[in-house]
Image (cartoon, grey):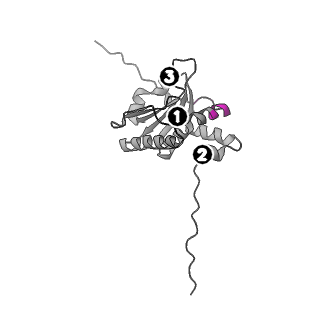
Amino acid sequence: MMKSVRPRKAPASEAPAQPNPTAASIKRMERAGVLEAVRACDSKKGADVTVLELEKGSSAFTDYFVICSGSNPRQMQAIADEVEQRLAKSGARPQSMEGYNQADWILIDYIDFVVHIFSESTRRFYDLERLWKSARRFDAAEMRAAVDRQPGRRAKAGLTTRRAVRKPPGRARKKK
């Protein structure tokens, strides 16, 4: 039996993202806790952080997917721990967590959104961005830009770019 040899398309993650998030969609994401999950992924150096806003009319079981990649199992577990800790501060507890010990694909379900933390090879294999291609796709950089465009929201949203922190002055030297 011969297999058909068909070249595989480039993953959807390489496709350009859809239009920038609006102020209303940023507000909905912030209310749901999605932005805090994105901040947690960014703080632990999660690669290629993406948010998918699933269509209301589709058979989706949640409103958002937060997807990121980790380079090794320890980093993936650190990202999952950080997401859980940050959202616990705001009172959100995950409904369930799967795959933490295997650390190949960690899934954290918060009902309104689901966080997927993949190893790089597993993310390429499952390619959720392609499977949910009807969803609106936002990169973390686009979300930062959208938050920055909103007046008075920059510091509150916390998705700003990192700035150098000024160190306090050292001890004054004694004169001889």
Residue bearing the label numbered 1:
50
Q: Residue at the location (55% across, 21% down)?
A: 134
Q: Tell which residue pokes out farthest to the top in this image.
A: 1
**Which residue type carries mark 1?**
Thr
Dot placed on the residue nearer the N-terminal end, 2 or 1? 1
Position of residue 105 relative to residue 166, above or below, is above
Pointer 2 and pointer 1: residues touching (CB < 8 Å)? no
Write the start and end of the magenta stretch as one range: 17-27
Across and down, in percent, residue 139 comes to 56, 35
Where the N terminus falls, by quadrant? top left
Q: Nearer the viewer, residue 89 or 60?
A: 89
Q: Judge from the rendering whether residue 69 lies leftward or rightward of residue 112; answer left or right.
A: left
User: Callout 1: 10 Å neighbours few (<14), some, many (20+)?
Assistant: many
SS label for mark 3: loop
Residue bearing the label numbered 3:
61
Q: Tell which residue pokes out farthest to the front in this image.
A: 91
**Which residue type carries mark 3?**
Phe
Residue bearing the label numbered 2:
158
Q: Residue at the location (68% across, 40% down)?
A: 149
Q: Is residue 63 visible?
A: yes
